Image (cartoon, rainbow, N blue to C red):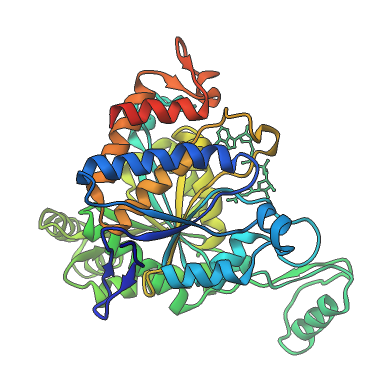
Amino acid sequence: MASKITKSLNGSLQVPDQPIIPFIIGDGIGPDIWHASVRVFDRAVEVAYGGKRKIEWKEILAGQKAFDTTGEWLPQETIDVLKEYLIGIKGPLTTPIGGGIRSLNVALRKELDLFVCQRPTKWYEGVPSPVKHPEYVNMVIFRENTEDIYAGIEFAAGTSDAAKIQDFLRDELHVDYNFSTGTGVGIKLVSELGSKRLIRAAIEHALEHKLPSVTLVHKGNIMKFTEGAFKNWGYELAETEFEHQTYTWGQWERTKEEKGDSAANAEQQEALAGGKLLIKDVIADNFLQQILLNPSDYSVIATLNLNGDYISDALAAIVGGIGIAPGANINYNTGHAVFEATHGTAPRFANTDTMNPSSVILSGVMMLEYMGWQEAADIIVKALSKTIKEKTVTVDFFSLMENATLVKTSSFADHIIEKL
Ligand code: NAD
């Protein structure tokens, strides 16, 4: 009988053979890409486990469909079900226009405290790319999901609240800044707890998957007490909680000061040869150059909310664009996770059966991996790669490939299923 996924007292996920998994179908192109993707998931699980395992899908409402049915964009029941069943998957959602909810995705992340936005970026052979060597990109981004300038604490120019804050800064804190009446205010918040739980998740991911490095990406040279603190807390965490498993650039610098360059280099080489994970950092603007110039130097990325937003899209573009970029929002402490297509609802193409379902399919792969159903995840990746390599593709890739075969969303899924 189908049952819920739970988290045991020791912190591990308990996944029954027939788990109930809630899904949000999504607006616009959501139904097209979901219907194609779910057939791939079901068949992959059936093939991988000989019928022993099966997902029971449970539809929950959000977005336009929820509004049309219940009058609410994000019904409380949807949040309650996601809380209860731990894991969910969703298609893209329309952002309501006007007051109230700013973004349904942000609201979901907040309600479930999904502090990690995880985005793997990897190139699949044959996918059209604007760079010469997209195969050098193989990174997993851990973007902090709850803090930073994205916390939504903003006051519009000309309001009394904005004026009050400016008065307080000038009169009480003696801030030397020439405030004018037409100035809006946004507050940037970065906490030790928020930074460390994100960086901890990134380090644990790198250790578990035997990846070579974690890079802290920040603008600490300018924003010292927020982004600079993020970097410092990251090094501190690595050197305390992961002392025996990591080697940090901070350690390298200390050895260099005491014993010189060559001793520091030798120490680093020995640590890495012994299997230690390298923890380094890079300034965000430089990182955006590095992903084009030296992408193979980077593996796991831990960064703040706004940097992570820019970096995720820049990397997605390098490996083939938003039609193929998956994502997940996770709270590693409670186990809650929502896997999602990273693109929007592309409303112009709703019900045309033309868009690329790869983003949802690969989000499902992340979900299966999170559940520990690695075999099903692996065969989907293999079949999807093969389909693209054979140049059987949807319109977004077709327009950029030579001698390709154009297929509909549903038929793209059929080709993957055939190969499973
Ligand atoms: P969009 O991502 O929906 O579309 C931009 C363009 O990208 C499309 O016109 C299309 O050419 C291409 N595209 C998107 N998905 C594709 C796919 N699967 N295959 C092939 N091509 C694809 O961005 P938008 O037009 O700015 O936003 C439309 C709506 O989606 C808005 O309401 C926005 O708020 C919402 N949105 C939702 C999410 C989400 O739920 N995660 C994310 C971004 C935008």
Q: Is residue 403 left or right of residue 271?
A: right
Q: Is residue 173 left or right of residue 183?
A: left
Query: Residue at 46% across / 11% down in the picture?
Result: 402
Rendering coords of residue 126 (x, y %): 38, 23
Which is more toward the observer, 401 or 76?
76
State whether residue 334 is above or below residue 171: above
Location of the N terminus (image quadrant) = bottom left
Rendering coords of residue 156 (x, y %): 82, 68
Q: Is residue 63 left or right of residue 117?
A: right
Rendered image quadrant of residue 239: bottom left
Q: Is residue 388 left or right of residue 152?
A: left
State whether residue 379 is above or below residue 253: above
Rendering coords of residue 85 (x, y %): 42, 68
Which is more toward the observer, 12 or 224?
12
Q: How many marks?
A: 0
Q: Residue furthest front?
A: 1
State whether residue 321 is above or below residue 14: above
Query: Residue at 49% across / 20% down in the picture?
Result: 407
Which is more toward the observer, 417 or 314?
417
Rendered image quadrant of residue 46: top left
Q: Can residue 179 be seen from the camera position used here?
A: yes
Q: Can residue 129 be seen from the camera position used here?
A: no
Question: Quadrant location of ligand 1?
Answer: top right
Location of the C terminus (image quadrant) = top left
Rendering coords of residue 249 (x, y %): 29, 62
Which is more toward the observer, 83 or 245?
83
Q: Residue furthest bottom?
A: 172
State whether residue 134 is above or below residue 150: above
